[in-house]
Image (tube, rainbow, N blue to C red):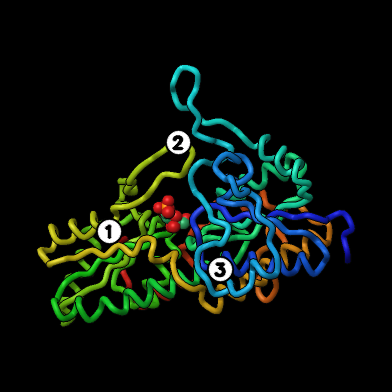
């Protein structure tokens, strides 16, 4: 079904990068060009549109078959991204010299109109898609594509980037087994994921961790120590503990590295805290490894490439069908459309009665509860 009114679309990538971004850009660009549309990429989130002084070569770059050639397997994003300077809360110096958060969305709407952009494909996580929704509310046609290694977006079975992050975390946990055993140590592995435990849970179960600490279950260190003692009694002199960066002790809070205007707080330190507490409580030599941004790097897995290509093409089909204010979502075996509002309304956390949780419990993995 052709939609005669779409002629020029823009694509942007916002928030933390995730493997698969370039595959989405390629699929959306080619699918749009095949419909006779012009395609532009916005540099660095929305910065290319509302901070033109920073982009002397142009903040809006034409995307052609040539510019998206050979990028499906590349990590990062050819457009650049940012997770600071949210345009709805842009850090700005007031006349009194004090910093405040300014809404600059109208400037971006003006730039869309000036460049005759009919529609936006916004590729992002909850933060970026909430920003995109505002442009939709202001009259721009908007389709979202769910991206994040954290897998915490609601209304889609999975976000792209997650599979690559989990696969890498699992192979890191695999590698830690031999050194943990050789030294008879406890190895603590901290993984990203913000306030959801998906990466920790799925890599921990797949990597056969002994303890997994996730934000959804505040942990009790005494229970963790109990599990480690049981391991020793059963003859296993080493243990692997996977800690989500958002994990928190019972009655306590998660570890925050920093808070800045115009951006989400940075988490970090959970793994070191757990490692120190384990060593203090059990006397077992304990080491901590933080996987951090390594989880966001590298080439997307086959799963992530395919889902990214499917999402990119589906976003263009949605625009062609006259849809707006929606996000493409995986609902196996198909990709469907869900209202952007529903997708960004609440965070998708690990359901405690899910089959993966039950499997972990059946395998004797401790969650510190
Ligand atoms: O949302 C993706 C993510 O990698 C989170 O898992 C993590 O907390 C955050 O981004 C890190 O952000 P930054 O790149 O600003 O350190």
Q: Earlier in the sequence, mark 1 or mark 3?
A: 3
Residue, disc 3: 20
Locate ligand 1 by image quadrant.
bottom left
Quadrant in which residue 155 is drawn: bottom right
Residue 156 horizontal side relative to residue 246, left or right: right
- Mark 2–mark 3 distance (CA, rounded to whole Å): 29 Å
Q: Which secondary structure lies at badge 3?
A: loop
The answer to whether one can see residue 364 in this image is no
Q: Is residue 207 above or below residue 131?
A: below
- Of the pair 194 and 6, the residue shown nearer to us: 6
Residue indicated by mark 1 = 271
In front here: 332 or 161? 161
Labels 1 & 3 near each other (Cβ < 8 A)? no
Identify the secondary structure beneath mark 1.
helix
Residue 75 visible: yes
Say which residue label 2 marks: 261
The Cα atoms of the two marked residues, 1 and 2, are separated by: 26 Å
């Amino acid at each position: 079904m052709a939609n005669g009114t779409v002629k020029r679309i823009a694509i942007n990538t916002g928030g933390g990068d995730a493997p698969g971004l370039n595959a989405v850009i390629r699929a959306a660009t080619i699918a749009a060009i095949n419909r006779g549309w012009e395609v532009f990429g916005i540099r660095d989130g929305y910065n290319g549109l509302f901070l033109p002084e920073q982009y002397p070569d142009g903040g809006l770059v034409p995307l052609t078959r040539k510019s998206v050639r050979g990028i499906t397997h590349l990590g990062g994003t050819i457009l650049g991204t940012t997770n600071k300077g949210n345009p709805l809360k842009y850090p700005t110096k007031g006349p009194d010299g004090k910093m405040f958060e300014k809404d600059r969305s109208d400037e971006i709407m003006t730039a869309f109109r000036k460049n005759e952009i009919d529609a936006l494909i916004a590729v992002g996580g909850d933060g970026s898609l909430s920003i995109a929704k505002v442009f939709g509310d202001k009259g721009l046609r908007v389709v979202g594509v769910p991206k994040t290694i954290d897998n915490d977006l609601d209304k889609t079975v999975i976000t792209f980037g997650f599979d690559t992050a989990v696969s890498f975390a699992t192979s890191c946990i695999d590698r830690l087994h031999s050194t943990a055993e050789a030294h008879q140590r406890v190895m603590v592995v901290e993984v990203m994921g913000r306030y959801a435990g998906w990466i920790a849970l799925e890599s921990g179960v797949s990597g056969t961790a002994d303890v997994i600490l996730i934000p959804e279950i505040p942990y009790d260190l005494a229970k963790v120590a109990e599990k480690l003692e049981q391991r020793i009694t059963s003859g296993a002199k080493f243990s692997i503990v996977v800690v989500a960066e958002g994990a928190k002790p019972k009655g306590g809070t998660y570890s925050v590295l920093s808070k800045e205007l115009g951006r989400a707080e940075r988490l970090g330190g959970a793994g070191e805290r757990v490692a120190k507490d384990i060593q203090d409580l059990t006397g077992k030599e304990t080491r901590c490894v933080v996987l951090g941004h390594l989880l966001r790097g590298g080439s997307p897995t086959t799963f992530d490439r395919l889902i990214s290509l499917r999402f990119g093409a589906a976003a263009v089909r949605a625009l062609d069908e006259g849809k707006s204010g929606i996000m493409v979502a995986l609902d196996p075996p198909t990709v469907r459309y869900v209202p952007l509002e529903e997708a960004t309304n609440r965070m998708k956390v690990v359901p405690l009665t899910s089959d993966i949780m039950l499997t972990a419990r059946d395998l004797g993995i401790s969650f510190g509860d």
